[in-house]
Image (tube, rainbow, N blue to C red):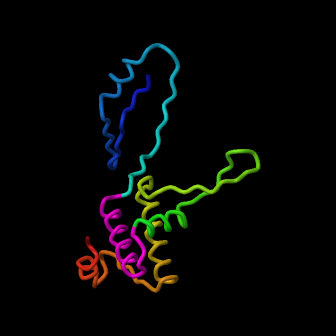
Amino acid sequence: MAKVINLTKKGEALEFSQDLGFALSTLRNGSYTITIKKVSERRSLPQNDLLWLWMTCIADETGQAKDDIYMYYCKKFLRKTITVKEGQPEIIYTTSSKLTMDEMRRFLDEIQADAATELGIALPNPEDRFFEQFYQQFNR
């Protein structure tokens, strides 16, 4: 059975989710591998809120359903090619719920650029001057 011990490094301090020595002493006899990997934080709620605010705006401007606009951008920017059967590449895509914060930031940047160049729609960021007006108009 695998043991999961979370580690957080803040400056020089290391914080463990449980006593490391005790947790290791509870393992059965045998050989083990310890893997340390950085945790990628999932997209944030403010990022997700901004995404859907933008989807509402684009839907209003184009007359399309916001879920359809969302799926369009997922297929356009969150796709990759895999080979399931030998020699037969398949294009698959994911949704934003699987993205890390950095991946979501790139996804939002791509949507913002595409909306501006392809649709002529300016999608503001929260720090932009007129964002509050935009928010009030499209927050539904």
Write down the quadrant of residue 104 in the picture: bottom left
Instruction: Decide if residue 72 is on the left or right side of residue 131.
Output: right
Viewer-closest of 135 and 29: 135
Q: How many marks?
A: 0
| Residue depicted at 44% across the width and 60% down the height | 102
Quadrant of image for the C terminus: bottom left
Quadrant of image for the N terminus: top left
| Residue depicted at 35% across the width and 67% down the height | 52
Instruction: Decide if residue 60 is on the left or right side of residue 32.
Output: left
In the displayed structure, 112 sits above or below 48; it is: below
In the displayed structure, 109 sits above or below 2; it is: below
x, y (%) of residue 5? 37, 33
Q: Furthest-top residue in view?
A: 29
Instruction: Decide if residue 93 is on the left or right side of residue 44.
Output: right
Main SS of the magenta segment? helix
x, y (%) of residue 111? 46, 72
Magenta span has 53?
Answer: yes
| Residue depicted at 31% across the width and 43% down the height | 13
| Residue depicted at 49% across the width and 63% down the height | 74
The range drawn in magenta is 44-66
x, y (%) of residue 70? 44, 66
Write down the quadrant of residue 68 in the picture: bottom left
x, y (%) of residue 83? 68, 49
Magenta span has 109?
Answer: no
